[in-house]
């Protein structure tokens, strides 16, 4: 034991305070000498004060004792148990499935299992894992089930080791079938261990005897399908199936939506043809998000009945509302136009903004998007509106320009945003595109930088593009900064917006063939948006102009599509089990637009058929949507993989406004059954690299002898604050009280 002072204010200041105490004590001696006449009284009082001063100094210096003790710590053993679905497989010739075999091994009978015996060797911690890792108490092991959708062996080893922190880990015992299909590579994890830990692996499972002829199995090995398809357009699904142990014969490959058969095809499988591909076609009729199931019949003698079906998700898009925007470079106009296109829930926009010679920033519905704008043969027809920004003649090939002209003639809509490049330096004059434009471009076209006000023409004020903009005096609008003086307007072309002095047309429209074309002859309409922020206008003219413009460009039959009162979407395309799903709902009133006062509920049906109802309040959803600020939203957490269906319903005043149903997948419920043979090679390699050992369930008891329990001695320092003991305060109070009693008896002040 060692004594030491813990100076509260540092040694120097603390000792100065002690000296001050002695000085005060010396002054008190002089006072006592004058007040008390007898020597015995003086000695008694001074003695009390000296003892009290000693107690004060004792507390000021804060004396402590330090004792060092040696503590023996027993090292830990970690047990990591695979609870993924593949552990529920019952191997041929086994009475129990893999997981039950593993639990019998760990728990035994009458507490004579592996866990109890490991516990006798030292401290034990148990973890279960599939895709994620969770520590479980010993008493819960018997209640565990093999329900995980994936197996991440490498992640499990890394997380289990990390869970011990500073504790001494002797070894890890991993019980698994080795079917690793998620997370980090086990080999990489073991190689990268900073503190090597021997891993003792118990492999559970068997390898099916594929040549024996007694083992029978048919499986769907792969499904290739587009995740975004066009409504009423035939699309293909390529399905790969295989057979083992069955005689040659026909096998129907079927695609279902819910319980409805969508399409089917028969393939022949058998010893002579163990693998085959089926190319199935189907034509989705209604836009939305759907989950389809591919199935092949299940035979009662099959080894694995779980791999006879696969699910895939498809987002069916309405091409009526598909918009393609091609922009030559980032600029103010493209920034605001992109924002408005993406905010319009009635559109499926895709924009390409060139950022380099052959590179593009792709925005909007980019799933399956190509690296270059889709202007090839048959690609442009998938859109109904084409917007061309700051791109000129040299940007396109002659075939592409001819294709755009044909696109308009066949009923497509074209919007040309005039810039210096496409009306002056690289004009479309003399190209196939020129014939469909509402103005006749020529070499005399000029890009002018000037400040000018605008106004609608009588035709413009009555036109659907400007009809909702009720501004009588357009002079309140921020002036434009540029205008293009171009050639004559073509016959049938109508100027809707002109300069204040009517010299320059700004917005010109006409119909060509079966299509519509709009030319905007200024690249500074964005000033309206900036001006709205600088000085609020009576209405958001920029947004209303673009909404009206796109609405007019869309074909007339889109009005029915736009009238969908309720739309529900998910915040992501794919989810895993236990990952929060956010549902975003928009409600539109046919007369007043977005409805903020509706009662919205979402009924969610899980893969097991159970349903629960969620209420979706109105609020800020910008954290979950890149294009919407406000809307209805709710969320739930799925705890199992499979197909989920959601029906969103909106009501107002007890009357239903509308409803929509969508489906989506959580995880992949068939992933664990695609390959069910034990991966003994991987497990043996993990044991070898980590300097552990590999065991079967029969040889597993040997690991009790192979695991060496280690103990280490750790010095523990114990400190005792002597000055802070109760008796110190009691002694000090007693001394002060004694002096007070003496002074009281002697009638001293």
Image (tube, rainbow, N blue to C red):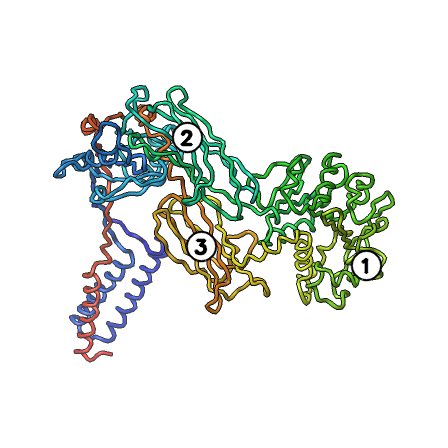
* Nearer to me, 135 or 510: 510
Q: Position of residue 679 (x, y in %)?
A: 33, 26
Task: Count residues near mark 1 (Cα–Cα under 10 Å), then give few for <14, some for 14-19, many for 20+.
Answer: many
Give left or right: position of 310 versus 543.
Answer: left
Give the residue at mark 3.
647
Which numbered marker is on residue 253? none
How dense is the environment of label 2, judged by Cα within 10 Å: few (below 14), some, or many (20 and up)?
A: some
- The CA span between labels 1 and 3 is 50 Å
| Residue carrying label 1 | 499
Return the x and y of residue 174 as percentages of the image width and height: 28, 32
Residue nearest the observer in this picture, 108 or 494? 494
Residue 712 appears anywhere in the view: no
Label 1 or label 3, whichever comes before in sequence order: 1
- Image quadrant containing the N terminus: top left
Query: Quick one: SS at disc 3?
Result: strand
Determine the secondary structure under disc 2.
strand
Mark 2 highlights which residue?
Answer: 221
Q: Position of residue 640 (x, y in %)?
A: 35, 45
Quarter occupied by the C terminus? bottom left
Residue depicted at x 26% and y 49%: 4
Quadrant housing residue 602: bottom left
What is the residue that sits farthest to the right in this orientation? 444
Q: Quadrant of residue 688?
A: top left
As drawn, is 60 to the left or to the right of 576?
A: left
Secondary structure beneath label 1: strand
Q: Gap in Å between the C-alphas at discs 3 and 2?
A: 32 Å
Q: Please rate how many residues cluster around mark 3, counting C-alpha atoms within 10 Å: few if below 14, some from 14 to 19, many from 20.
A: some
Q: Is residue 14 above or below residue 102?
A: below
């Amino acid at each position: 034991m060692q004594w030491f002072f813990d100076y509260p204010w540092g040694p120097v200041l603390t000792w100065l305070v002690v000296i001050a105490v002695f000085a005060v004590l010396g002054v008190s001696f002089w006072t006592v000498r004058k007040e008390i006449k007898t020597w015995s009284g003086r000695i008694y009082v001074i003695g009390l004060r000296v003892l009290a001063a000693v107690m004060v100094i004792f507390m000021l210096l804060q004396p402590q004792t330090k004792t060092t003790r040696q503590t023996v710590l027993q090292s830990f053993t970690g047990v990591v148990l695979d609870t993924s679905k593949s552990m529920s497989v019952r191997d041929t010739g086994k009475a129990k499935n893999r997981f039950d075999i593993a639990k019998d091994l760990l728990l035994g009978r009458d507490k004579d299992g592996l866990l109890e015996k490991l516990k006798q060797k030292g401290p034990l911690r148990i973890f279960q894992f599939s895709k994620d890792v969770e520590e479980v108490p010993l008493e819960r092991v018997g209640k565990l089930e093999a329900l995980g959708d994936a197996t991440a062996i490498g992640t499990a080893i890394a997380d289990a080791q990390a869970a011990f922190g500073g504790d001494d880990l002797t070894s890890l015992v991993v019980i698994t079938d080795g079917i690793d299909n998620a997370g980090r590579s086990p080999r990489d994890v073991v190689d990268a261990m900073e503190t090597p830990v021997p891993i003792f692996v118990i492999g559970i499972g068997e390898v099916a005897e594929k040549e024996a002829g007694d083992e029978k199995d048919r499986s769907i090995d792969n499904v290739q399908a587009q995740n975004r398809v066009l409504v009423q357009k035939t699309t293909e699904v390529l399905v790969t199936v295989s057979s083992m142990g069955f005689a040659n014969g026909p096998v129907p490959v079927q695609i279902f939506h819910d319980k409805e058969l969508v399409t089917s095809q028969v393939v022949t499988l058998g010893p002579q043809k163990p693998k085959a591909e089926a190319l199935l076609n189907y034509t989705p009729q209604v836009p939305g998000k759907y989950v389809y199931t591919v199935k092949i019949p299940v035979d009662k003698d099959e080894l694995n009945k779980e791999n006879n079906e696969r699910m895939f998700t498809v987002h069916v898009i309405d091409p009526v509302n598909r918009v393609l925007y091609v922009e030559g470079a980032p600029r103010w106009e493209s920034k605001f136009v992109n924002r408005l296109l993406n905010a319009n829930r009635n559109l499926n926009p895709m924009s390409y903004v060139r950022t380099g010679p052959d590179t593009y920033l792709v925005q909007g519905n980019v799933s399956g998007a190509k690296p270059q704008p889709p202007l090839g043969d048959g690609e442009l027809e998938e859109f109904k509106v084409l917007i061309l920004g700051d791109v000129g003649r040299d940007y396109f090939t002659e075939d592409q320009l001819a294709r755009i002209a044909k696109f308009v003639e066949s009923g497509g809509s074209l919007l040309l945003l005039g810039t210096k490049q496409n009306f002056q330096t690289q004009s479309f004059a003399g190209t196939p595109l020129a014939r469909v434009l509402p103005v006749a471009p020529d070499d005399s076209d000029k890009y002018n930088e000037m400040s000018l006000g605008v106004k609608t023409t009588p035709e413009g004020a009555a036109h659907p593009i400007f009809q909702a903009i009720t501004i009588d005096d357009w002079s309140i609008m921020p002036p434009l900064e540029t205008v293009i003086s171009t050639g004559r307007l073509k016959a049938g072309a109508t100027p809707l917006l002109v300069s204040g002095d009517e010299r320059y047309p700004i917005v010109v429209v006409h119909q060509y063939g079966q299509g519509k074309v709009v030319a905007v002859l200024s690249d500074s309409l964005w000033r309206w948006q900036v001006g709205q922020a600088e000085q609020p206008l009576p209405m958001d003219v920029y947004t209303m102009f673009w909404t009206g413009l796109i609405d007019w460009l869309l074909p007339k039959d889109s009005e029915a599509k736009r009238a969908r009162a309720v739309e529900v979407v998910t915040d992501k395309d794919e989810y895993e089990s236990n990952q929060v799903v956010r549902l975003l709902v928009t409600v539109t009133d046919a007369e007043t637009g977005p409805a903020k006062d509706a009662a919205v509920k979402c009924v969610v049906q899980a893969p097991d058929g159970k349903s629960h109802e969620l209420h979706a309040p109105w609020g800020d959803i910008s954290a979950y949507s890149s294009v919407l600020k406000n809307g209805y939203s709710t969320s739930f957490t799925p705890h199992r993989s499979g197909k989920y269906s959601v029906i969103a319903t909106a009501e107002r005043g007890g009357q239903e406004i509308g409803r929509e149903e969508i489906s989506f997948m959580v995880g992949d419920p068939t992933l664990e059954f695609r390959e069910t043979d034990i991966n003994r090679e991987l497990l043996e390699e993990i044991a070898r690299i980590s300097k552990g050992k590999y065991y079967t369930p029969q040889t597993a008891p040997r690991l009790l002898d192979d695991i060496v329990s280690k103990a280490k001695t750790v010095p523990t320092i114990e400190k005792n604050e002597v000055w802070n003991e109760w008796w110190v305060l009691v002694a000090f109070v007693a001394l002060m009280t004694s002096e007070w009693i003496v002074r009281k008896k002697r009638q001293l002040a």
